[in-house]
Image (cartoon, rainbow, N blue to C red):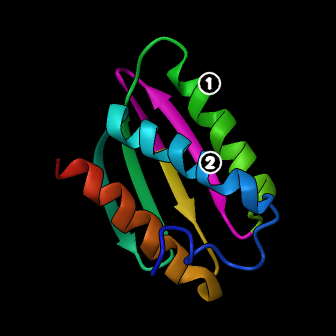
């Protein structure tokens, strides 16, 4: 499976922009991701380190992602030195969440 084959047809982000968006998530994961928690099949929690402007950057990315992939629901919280991102999907998009969890998890294990 190629890097972007898991992106569902319902994603409205133009195909040419998809690698750029994936790179944004990968960069965030590489720089800030501390923990990936899959507490439920349809919910993923990402724990990130904070810093100046990071919470706003994460909220912006989550908002843009939710705008093109309406099946995602993002809740971004910040407090202390960390940022939490809860990502939820409906049952028909569980495989998309699986792919996001795997991609994020690969960054944590580095």
56 horizontally vs 42: left or right: right
Q: Quadrant of the N terminus?
A: bottom left
Q: Total of numbered circles in the picture? A: 2
State left or right for residue 90 relative to residue 36: right
77 shown above or below 46 = above
Q: Main secondary structure of the magenta part?
A: strand
User: Considering only order in the chain, which callout, 2 or 1, is on the residue closer to the N terminus?
Assistant: 2
Residue at image coords 33%, 39%: 30
List the residue tagged with mark 1. 56
Kind of element beneath mark 2: helix
Q: Position of residue 37 (x, y in %)?
A: 32, 60
Q: Residue furthest left?
A: 110
Q: Nearer the viewer, residue 89 or 98?
A: 98
Q: Position of residue 17 (x, y in %)?
A: 72, 51
At label 1, counting other C-alpha atoms closer than 10 Å, the crowd grade (few under 14, some 14-19, many 20 or more) is few
Position above or below: 107 against 11: above
Q: Which residues are magenta?
A: 71-84
Q: Is residue 8 above or below residue 72?
A: below
Where residue 99 appears, x then y in whole percent?
Answer: 44, 72
Q: Nearer the viewer, residue 11 or 89?
A: 11
User: Which label was assigned to residue 21?
Assistant: 2
Select label 1 or label 2 by which is in front.
Answer: 2
């Amino acid at each position: 499976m190629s890097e972007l084959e898991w992106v569902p047809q319902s994603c409205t982000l133009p195909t040419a922009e998809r690698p750029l968006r994936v790179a944004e998530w990968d960069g965030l994961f590489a720089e800030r991701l501390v923990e990936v928690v899959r507490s439920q099949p349809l919910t993923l929690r990402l724990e990130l380190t904070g810093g100046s402007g990071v919470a706003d950057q994460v909220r912006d990315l989550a908002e843009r992602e939710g705008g093109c992939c309406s099946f995602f629901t993002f809740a971004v919280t910040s407090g202390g030195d960390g940022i939490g991102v809860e990502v939820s999907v409906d049952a028909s998009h569980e495989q998309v969440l699986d792919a996001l969890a795997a991609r994020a998890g690969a960054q944590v294990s580095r």
